[in-house]
Amino acid sequence: MCSIWRNAIDQVLTNLFSNAVKYSPGNPAIRIRGGRAGPNVLVSVRDYGLGIAEEDATKIFSRFFRAQNSTGIVGTGIGLNLVKELVTLHGGAVHMESKAGLGSTFTIRLPVQGPQKQRFMAASA
């Protein structure tokens, strides 16, 4: 994998890890799991913090969107949008499960072989 994609995946994981910590005040337990499923690598990050209300869930990957319960927590609303964009460019997908007050799980699926060449060329141009 070339350095541009390594850096992109580093950014994805950093955003997911930092969000898990940031949105779990008073409950520092974070569960990170990884493994392979066929031609894909799966990584999930689970926190037991604020969670995301059902009405906010459909917008959580939108640029500059901040969930209603994030008031008072520093952020710009671009982290999860960047996660989705980078994972998609890599040929993968991101999935979120959350319940308000119970925490969230974000799972990314990435192809083991890396991004397809045409995606790579478009992203590095």
Image: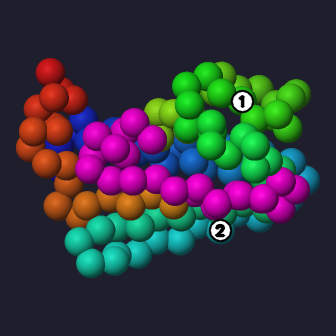
Look at the picture and state if 46 lies above or below 69: below
Determine whether, in the image, residue 109 is placed left or right of residue 29: left
Per the image, label 1 sits on a secondary structure element best described as loop
> How many numbered discs, if any?
2
The residue located at (62%, 37%) in the rendering is: 59
Q: Is residue 93 magenta?
A: yes
The residue located at (33%, 53%) in the rendering is: 92
At label 1, the amino acid type is Arg
Magenta highlight range: 84-106
Residue 33 at what x, y percent from top left? 53, 71
Determine whether, in the image, residue 47 is placed left or right of residue 38: right
Q: Work out whether residue 71 can be spotted.
A: yes
| Mark closer to the observer (1, 2) | 1
The residue located at (40%, 36%) in the rendering is: 85
In this figure, which residue is indicated by the disc labeled 1? 66
Residue 44 at what x, y percent from top left? 53, 64
For the C terminus, the quadrant is top left
Q: For label 2, count other residues whose C-alpha is less than 10 Å away and answer few (under 14), some (14-19) or many (20+).
A: few
Q: Work out whether residue 24 can be spotted.
A: no
In space, the residues marked 1 and 2 are separated at their CA atoms by 23 Å
At label 2, the amino acid type is Arg
Instruction: Using the image as rendered, state which of residue 67 and residue 25 is in the foreground.
Output: 67
Residue 46 at what x, y percent from top left? 66, 63
Look at the picture and state if 30 lies above or below 50: below
In the picture, the disc for residue 31 is 2
Residue contact between numbered discs 1 and 2, judged by CB atoms under 8 Å: no
Mark closest to the chain's N terminus, 1 or 2: 2
Q: Is residue 54 magenta?
A: no
